[in-house]
Image (cartoon, rainbow, N blue to C red):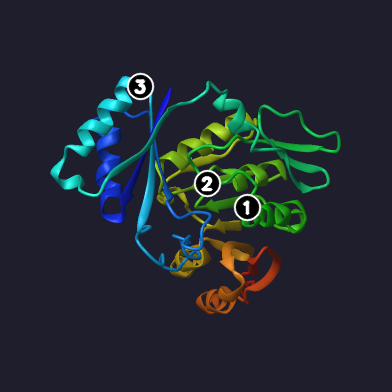
Amino acid sequence: MFELVLRASQALVEPVSDVLMDELDALSVSVEDADAGTDGERALFGEPGMPAPAAGWDRSTIKALFETETAAEQAATLLLAQDWATGLSVQAMSELADQDWVRITQSQFSPVPITPTFWIVPSWHEPPAAAQIVMRLDPGLAFGTGTHPTTRMCLRWLASDGLGADMARVLDYGCGSGILAIGAALMGAQSIDAVDIDPAAVQSTRDNATHNGVVLMSGFPDRAQGLYGVVLANILATPLKILAPLLCDHLKPGGRLVLAGILERQAQEVALAYQPWLTLSVAAQEEGWILMCGQRPLDP
């Protein structure tokens, strides 16, 4: 396998990447800050819910992998010959040693403890001796592997406070990998709807539920029907505010609402969005993220 390393301005990154993948048969293309590790390095992405500080780096390093040296050389030659690619330069071209990429990727994901007895364990790991409840989950296209604080806080709620909630019907809105819906099933939920706007998430949830031997229904948001004793939504503050009427309408009197994907500084604005229906409070916080919970009042 051969790696072609290019230097490009911000304006060239997208067209060069597209040509490498679509026309020059690159196996993969990655883009990095050319000034990484120097005083010129800068973050490209802002905080969740906030606009990115810039569309891209001023100078980027584009790395493309090819099966053969000839393919890498031809790609470089063709790109440098394009009139629109002025300023593009070749930094390096080298052969990469064979590596077990699957094993390297797997080594980045270890079992994740939710509680001392509840663990998320990738399929290539043996469960820890202390694990009494095990969720099998591998990284995939959909968000949710248990490593993010927001996911851990939601699962911890299910494993503690959730045991005292009405788990007859549970809704996981924005299910991603299905991790919260599966967690609810492992904690005794009887009927679970997991919904998402992303078809990959819907399929991922179905697959992960099968691998864990739990029964749930996964589909698009219109699948959510009727009232639920628990509604879970681990998204981000802005969509959570927009979804306030919808999520609260799905909550039965006395039902519990559990929201995550919220930064500490966003607590008040999210609470205000839900105030017409219920009172939200901060139930947990971890690494700058918070879990907010509320209970719909019982009918008078």
Q: Nearer the viewer, mark 2 or mark 3?
A: 3
Residues marked 1 and 2 touching at CB (< 8 Å): yes
Q: Amino acid at mark 2?
A: Phe
Residue occupying the point 57% across, 34% down = 208
Q: Residue at x 17, y 37 (%)?
A: 81
Near-viewer residue (168 or 155): 155
Residue located at (67% from left, 63% from top)? 287
The kind of residue tagged 1 is: His
Residue marked by disc 2? 143
Identify residue for label 1.
Answer: 148
Q: Position of residue 212 (x, y in %)?
A: 65, 32
Q: Residue lying furthest left in this view?
A: 83
Horizontal side of 211 relative to 34 (left or right) equals right
Disc 1: CA contacts within 10 A as few (<14), some (14-19) or many (>=20): some
**Label 1 residue SS:** loop
Which of the two labelled residues, at mark 2 and mark 3, occupies the earlier sequence position? 3
- Read off the residue under disc 3: 69
Residue type highlighted by circle 3? Glu
